[in-house]
Image (spheres, grey):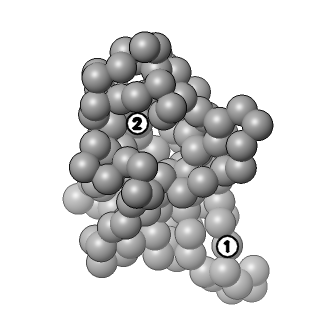
Amino acid sequence: QVQLVESGGGLGQAGGSLRLSCAASGSIFSINAMGWYRQAPGKQRELVALITRNGSSNYADSVKGRFTISRSAAKVTVYLQMNSLKPEDTAVYYCVARGAMAPIGPYDYWGQGTQVTVSS
């Protein structure tokens, strides 16, 4: 199993910055990618950013150029630096660890979620 502990988030202002962190523990050797999804009230959960084991990353169009995903040298902590915040970035942000291991096969493990609220 993989355990994820998120930190950061909270209240930010439009145009400001916030940083999220997510630390993984457990079967970290099985993780192929880590990243962030978000879910706003009344909307579906959507991908924000993902970084793979080899360091490649992809972003939602809505956050490109504003958000940056990175990870620690040990690859057990992933960060989301959020700049130029907009009120529409308000959501619960969930960390995800994606991988595969026997006997369960492919998996997604999720963090508990952290609220990000951006005021205008």
Dot 1 surroundings within 10 Å: few (below 14), some, or many (20 or more)? some
Q: Quadrant of residue 47?
A: bottom right
Percent across and percent down for residue 38 are 58, 44
Q: Who is closer to the viewer here, 59 or 29? A: 59
Residue 66, disc? none
Q: Secondary structure at mark 2?
A: strand
- Is residue 33 shown left or right of residue 72? right
Note whether 2 is above or below 12 in the view shown: below
How many numbered circles does the render carry?
2
- Is residue 40 shown left or right of residue 120? right
For the point 47% across and 25% down, which residue is it?
87
Dot 2 surroundings within 10 Å: few (below 14), some, or many (20 or more)? many
For the point 59% across and 33% down, which residue is it?
91
- The disc labelled 2 sits on which kind of residue? Leu
Quadrant, the N terminus? bottom right
Q: Secondary structure at mark 1?
A: strand
Residue 107, disc? 1
Percent across and percent down for residue 98 are 56, 69
**What's the CA distance linking mark 2 and mark 1?**
22 Å
Note whether 85 is above or below 120 in the view shown: below
For the point 65% across and 36% down, which residue is it?
40
- The disc labelled 1 sits on which kind of residue? Tyr
Residue 20, disc? 2
Q: Who is closer to the viewer here, 14 or 12? A: 14
Percent across and percent down for residue 32 are 47, 75
Q: Quadrant of residue 12?
A: top left
Which sits earlier in the primary sequence, circle 2 or circle 1? 2
